């Protein structure tokens, strides 16, 4: 992609600033951004609002689960009851989708996942009682492995098309109208 995905632009915002704004919803007490590659540059250039907790993942080359674990450590330190996992390369999620995931968690879901047209999307919400399973996940399977191993935990909520729209290539930027 020519640089960190977090710094790609969607309108006037970076992907990361857009994710922070998206997750700053009622029922969400704080936003933790886990940054790996080019931590200092992303932190300086993303245009983040004050109050976002930045956590550096020095093991980012080990895969997405390493970032999940860094975020989990910070969420535990803050005494959170649940967390939302949202990859930065999904900037098109609607606030309504986030609200439905949060509501499902508040209503007692152990894991809440938005789905659109039969596909799971983001953000996924995990209640605190599921965190040991996230910690025990294998790096190759990550959070998806937890969903596969514990389908009885998962509550699916309606998601918008953006919840499944991952932007991984320059062609994706064009296809989703971001570029």
Image (cartoon, rainbow, N blue to C red):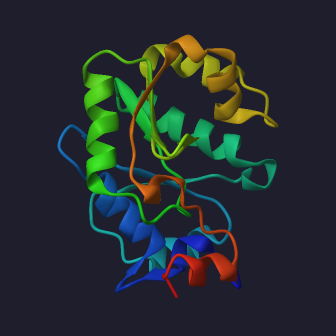
Q: Tell me which residue sits at (30%, 34%) in the image.
A: 102
Quadrant of image for the N terminus = bottom right
Q: Position of residue 90 (x, y in %)?
A: 51, 61
Count of numbered tags: 0
Asked whether 118 or 159 is in front, the reply is 118
Q: Tell me which residue sits at (45%, 67%) in the image.
A: 16
- As drawn, the residue found furthest toward the left would be 26
Q: 30 above or below 156?
A: below
112 on left or right of 140: left
Q: Is residue 30 visible?
A: no
Q: Picture quarter containing residue 54?
A: bottom left
Q: Picture quarter containing residue 48?
A: bottom left
72 on left or right of 26: right
Asked whether 52 or 125 is in front, the reply is 125
Q: 144 above or below 133?
A: below
Q: Position of residue 100 (x, y in %)?
A: 29, 38
Q: Tell me which residue sits at (26%, 42%) in the image.
A: 99
Q: 59 above or below 68?
A: below
Q: Position of residue 111 (x, y in %)?
A: 46, 24
Q: Position of residue 68 (x, y in %)?
A: 59, 40
Asked whether 106 or 58 is in front, the reply is 106
Asked whether 107 or 7 is in front, the reply is 107
3 on left or right of 81: right
Q: Is residue 31 visible?
A: yes
Q: 53 above or below 123?
A: below
Q: Tell me which residue sits at (25%, 18%) in the image.
A: 107
Q: Picture quarter containing residue 5?
A: bottom right
């Amino acid at each position: 992609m020519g640089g960190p995905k977090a710094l790609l632009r969607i309108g006037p915002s970076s992907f990361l600033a857009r994710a922070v704004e998206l997750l700053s919803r009622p029922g969400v007490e704080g936003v933790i951004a886990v940054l790996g590659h080019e931590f200092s540059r992303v932190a300086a250039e993303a245009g983040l609002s004050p109050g976002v907790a930045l956590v550096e993942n020095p093991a980012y080359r080990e895969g997405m689960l390493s970032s999940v674990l860094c975020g989990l450590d910070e969420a535990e330190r803050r005494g959170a009851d649940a967390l939302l996992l949202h990859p930065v390369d999904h900037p098109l999620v609607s606030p309504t989708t986030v609200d439905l995931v949060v509501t499902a968690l508040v209503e007692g879901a152990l894991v809440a996942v938005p789905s659109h047209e039969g596909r799971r999307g983001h953000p996924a919400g995990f209640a605190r009682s599921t965190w040991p399973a996230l910690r025990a996940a294998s790096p190759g399977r990550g959070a998806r492995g937890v969903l596969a191993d514990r389908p009885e935990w998962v509550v699916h909520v309606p998601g918008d098309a953006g919840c499944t729209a991952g932007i991984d290539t320059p062609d994706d930027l064009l296809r989703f109208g971001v570029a």
